[in-house]
Image (cartoon, helix red, strand yellow):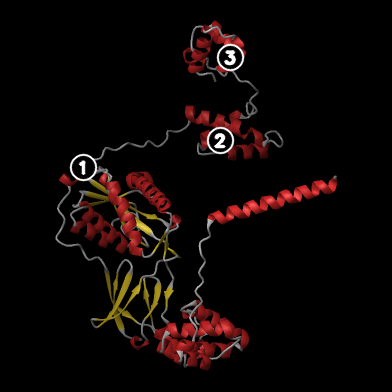
Amino acid sequence: MVKDGRVKELRRLLRLGRTLEDSARMAEMSEKSARKYRDGDGLPSQRKKSVRTYRTRVDPFESVWPEVEQQLEAEPRLKAKAILEWLQQKYRGKFPDSTRRTLERRVNRWRSLHGPGKTVFFDQEHHPGRLAASDFTVCNDLGVRIAGQRFDHMFFHCVLTYSNVESVSLCFSESFEALSTGIQKAFWDFGGVPARHRSDSLAAAVRNHTSRRELTERYAALMSYYNCEAERTNARCANENGDVESSNGHLKDRIDQALMLRGSRNFESREEYVDFVEDLIRRANDNRQKKYLEDTAQLRRLPDTRLDTDDIVTDVRVSRSSTIRVRTNTYSVPSRLIGQLVDLRIGAEYITVTHHGNVIQTMPRLVGKQLAAINYRHIIDSLVRKPGAFANYRYREEMFPTSSFRLTWDTLRAAHSEKVADKMYVQILHLAAHESQDAVADALRHLLATEHTFDVDQVRKLVADAASIPAPTDVHVEAPQLCEFDSLLTTFDKECLNHDQHESETDN
């Protein structure tokens, strides 16, 4: 399509005395078009476009359209692809796949003229200090690593919808504890409490299995403590929480771009990564201060302290397998507690076990369902007396604290019978529990590298004489100098040239 600027350039060249051929070439149009605009007065944008009301080819669906229309009236959600497949079954060989686009255009035209009304989205006005919206967003695709290890994580993301000032909180699941920690951190970051807080229908806040879909007691208590009205969106209606849903994408994109500029996605510690993200949030919020001041003028006063929302579970009995069940997951405890009742404090990331007010242990909370965290030290004294139970132990995979222990078991299985190998491995594990896991792991590493097979006595001797174990080989690869590759390429080019010259001389 010829633009107005090209026509103006054409006429300018013609006024300068250029030939039509030269002017057309310099204005980048054909001579035919140049002649038309030379003889005419208007510009392309001033020409009235005629609307074509006729077809340029025969409609292949003309004869069957009444049938198609009947189907659409009965079920307007039918897609053109499904209708085409139905027609192909009914009229064999008449409607090839190449007619699909024609049918799609005609179906779309029918929907525009005769179809049902579509859902209308209503743009909302936001008012200072009135609403905060929150959501969980998964950030695994960012490829962040902590000390070289993949770091799967989420962020609880909360936004003041008027100023778009935001707050984030690192978490690993959509639990109530993570929700509570995130909301309270956000309110303190905002410097006040908004009138309403909106979230989607996550199970930590809403009883989705009931018809009334009421708030959970713990979430309602949290909102009551802050004098904040709780709102929830309808299921599968992300647009109702659009402010934070949109901000989720911007947040992850901002982190991703900052990681690119940083040049590495690896952090020495989790704290370093959190500080990195918090710095990005602070810089983003600095650009929203004008509206944020209007927000703060309307935010409600914070309470004196944050609400402790850790879940307290009392009288949990320790099973005969020295384990307890905590929200579908299994954890081991010291075997001396078998048959006793313990109390639990369940936080967002950790679970604390107490007995008569004494803290027994604090363990990381598992993320997921039907998982197990078994500490071999809790059960090894019984297992060493019953090594035959190891082969089919339900949580056997938890009995390999490091890769060296797993390789040891595989090596023993290859050299001995299953019964003997299991007994030897359990004895090695018992040694690790009562001596030093690191010392035993070093001994196993040395024996795996130097011996075809070994027994527990050899491991015990090495543990007793740890100084005789050579230190692990420190493999250091120096960064290459890029200029050295240039010399390699030059050498390669010379070799290719010499080879070509040799072939040419041979042919001659």
Q: Mark 3: which amino acid?
A: Ala
Q: Quadrant of residue 61?
A: top right
Q: Secondary structure at mark 1?
A: loop
Q: Mark 2: which amino acid?
A: Gln
**Left or right: where does residue 336 sit relative to residue 59?**
left
Q: CA distance from mark 3 to mark 1?
A: 60 Å
In this view, the mark in front (2 or 1): 1
- Residue 4 vs residue 331, the one in the foreground: 4
In this view, the mark in front (3 or 1): 3
Q: Which residue is denoted by mark 1 in the rendering?
A: 128
- The percent coordinates of residue 70 (x first, y second) are 56, 32
Seen in the picture, residue 504 relative to 393 is either above or below; the reply is above
Seen in the picture, residue 297 relative to 189 is either above or below; the reply is above
Q: CA distance from mark 2 to mark 3?
A: 54 Å
Q: Which mark is residue 24?
A: 3
The residue carrying pointer 1 sits among few (fewer than 14), some (14 to 19) or many (20 or more) residues within 10 Å by Cα, namely: many
- The percent coordinates of residue 43 (x first, y second) are 48, 12
Q: Mark 1: which amino acid?
A: Pro
| Quadrant containing the C terminus in the rendered view | top right
> Is residue 94 something one can see in this rendering?
yes
| Quadrant containing the N terminus in the rendered view | top right
Q: Which residue is denoted by mark 2 in the rendering?
A: 71
Name the residue at 40% across, 71% down: 328
> Is residue 208 something one can see in this rendering?
no
Question: Mark 2 or mark 1, which has the lower sequence index?
Answer: 2
Question: Mark 3 or mark 1, which has the lower sequence index?
Answer: 3
- Residue 417 vs residue 71, the one in the foreground: 417
Q: Quadrant of residue 240?
A: top left
Q: Which mark is residue 36?
A: none
Count of numbered badges drawn on the protein: 3
Q: Secondary structure at mark 3?
A: helix
